[in-house]
Image (tube, rainbow, N blue to C red):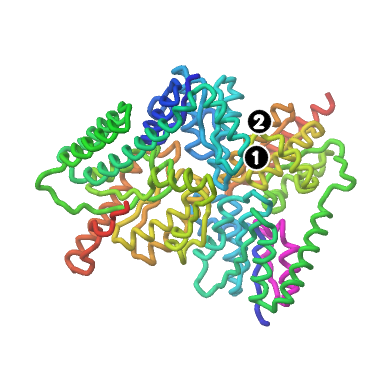
Amino acid sequence: MGLTVGIPRALFYYQHAPFWSTFFEGLGLETVESPHTNKEILDLGSARAVDGCCLPLKVFLGHVLHLADRGIDTIFVPKIVSIVRREYICPYFLGLPDFARHYLPNHVRILDPVVDKRRWSWQWARSFVRFGSDLASFRQAVRAFSKAQQRQRDWEAKQLIEGHELPKNAVLLLGHRYLIEDRFFSGSIFDSFSKSGFHLVMAHQLPEPVLRMYARRLQKRMFWTSGRQSLGAMEYVADHIVGVVTLASFACGTDSLVSDLIQRRARNAGVPNIVLHLDEHTGAAGTITRLEAFIDMLQRRRTS
Amino acid sequence: MKITFPHMGSLYIPVEALFQELGFEVVVPPPCTKRTLELGSRYSPEIACLPLKVMIGNYLEAAELGADTIAMIGGCGPCRLGYYAEVQRQILADLGSTLDMVVIETPLENPSRLARDAAKILGRGKLSRVPRALILAWEKLKACESLEKTALRVRPKEEKPGLTTRVLELALQKVRQAAAVRTVHKAVQEGIGELWAVQEKHGRQDPIIIGLVGEIYTVFEPFVNLRLEERLGHLGVEVARTISLVQWVKDHVFKGSIGLYRTTHLERSAEGFLSGFVGGHGLETIARSNELANCGAAGVVQILPFTCMPEVIAQAILPDVSRAKELPILSLVVDEHTGEAGFQTRIEAFVDLLSRKRREAYRGQTQSLFGSRCGFGQY
């Protein structure tokens, strides 16, 4: 088949890329990924997107439009309702395919399988196999699905900290994975910390069952997966870290509450913390200055 | 135990009745004012959405009047409202406030906790009074809504500007004071009669009809939406409010709490634009706009708090509905910095546009039904 599927390098790409690429490979389809986020893509997205939506959504739109401009007329935008039982990602993800469709010319086809593990995880398997068998044979779809799932699991296991031991002088970096892993936004954070002698630890490097267990300490069950992981990580390592950096996007609904809760928790635990709000006008210089001051403070605390 | 709760339009009337009938002392927070908002935004996370901030203001002002317990609803996502109560509890605790919070969660979310909270409330009230309290509150809720809906229909034709609002306020107070179901019914009947009497005798009889969609809190709380319904009414517009609290309670409390609520009818109305639930009232916004276009509304106004996630999705998609149905749509975003003048200008420009469009339609006789009242029974 001559179908080429465009995969925007945004949002859940950073979390599910191995699964997606293996799945399409198994179906015998060619995939094209959009390039890493750059100024041009960001501008493309933020110029078109409705004002009031969050930065990652604008970036996502930029990637989608970039793919469409390159003449790719099949774009993969899954509708990710939930990836963990009884939890959501955020309302934006529920309307993502419709959102993307609004901005795209009519001839562009959107592939929008539903990922919904709210009730039963096999619902998700069924919807993906059904989606796959529309593009190839049923057999191929089943095989591609199980292979993709295996790849995904291996990849996730590789993310964990070796030996499950926190390094010394660990600083917890919290936030949506698609912000943390997009080096266009987080590059300056990693650069600042690389020379400082502090080690950044992220929630996805900690084992998920542990995060879930510690998140139970919260007074109210957190129903956003990313928020639950962040708060769980905070509970888990609060006594073993020297600082917390929270990366939040302006106008992100979940971050607006979660980053506040993280701040309060850090204050109670006596851990220094900083919240960096990102939007399309954020300059690297300002971020670096603030981080340098924060790192200076951590170093002074360590020596005293 | 002096109980209080956040404001949302005239909702305080039924809620006050509910707790009073249960035998509690109730402190209704003072009506939302600039001070409420200032207090609220001083202590809330900066980028949280507007309702959270106003509610914090409500709590603090109620505490000044002696309240010691807050009743608040919970939820289980995906909208932020579900986590409000917890964040607010922490904000108040960090402020050193002694306010206690009772959160009413949906039964399916955490049955044991609901039972515990219910026991906490009911333990000090009288169990035998629960049915009576629920019935009275329900009747008052229906009463307030039917009065408000009548006011929406009457206001564009009122004799003196502002008269409808005054009559409505008097009627609502009568409902508030009514202590039995029969007195509530009587107050509503009288109120509706008085409201219809406000109309100009020989005025024009066909105001432009605009549908109001959007986020429930901003639709109902007049302080937050800068009295949008009144502003539109004074410009000679009849507002068809598509969100109904009575319907909301039927759907989410009666059906939803036992897992019977389905959104199929909304999905059918929104077909081709939005494929399903996006939290909050996002799906409703799209579905109702589409329905309004089909029954001949002249335009639609969407109102949302800044960064409201479900409504932003709807806002992005509404232009599609607008184009497909040739229906003018105005999205109004409110936050703590919204200024009155800019708001008024935008509304006036929108209404001007609609009335010009209607004049042209009349002249050409192309759309004789444009913006008239046919098919609006349900709103």
In whole angstroms, how far apart are the C-alphas of marks 1 and 2? 17 Å
Q: Is residue B306 left or right of residue B140?
A: right
Of A273 and B314, nearer the camera is B314
Of B334 and B279, nearer the camera is B279
- What type is the residue that disc 1 sits on? Arg
Q: Residue at x 67, y 75 (%)?
A: A133
Q: Residue at x 28, y 39 (%)?
A: B147
Q: Tag 1, which secondary structure?
A: loop
Q: Residue at x 62, y 50 (%)?
A: A88
State the image coordinates of residue B151 (x, y, percent, origin top left): 25, 41
Question: Image quarter for residue B362?
Answer: bottom left
The span picked out in magenta is: A11-38
Farthest left residue in view: B202
Residue A19 located within the stretch drawn in magenta: yes
Residue A225 located within the stretch drawn in magenta: no
Q: Which mark is residue A221?
A: 1
Q: Which residue is mark 2?
A: A264
- In the rendered view, would you say B375 is above or below B202? below
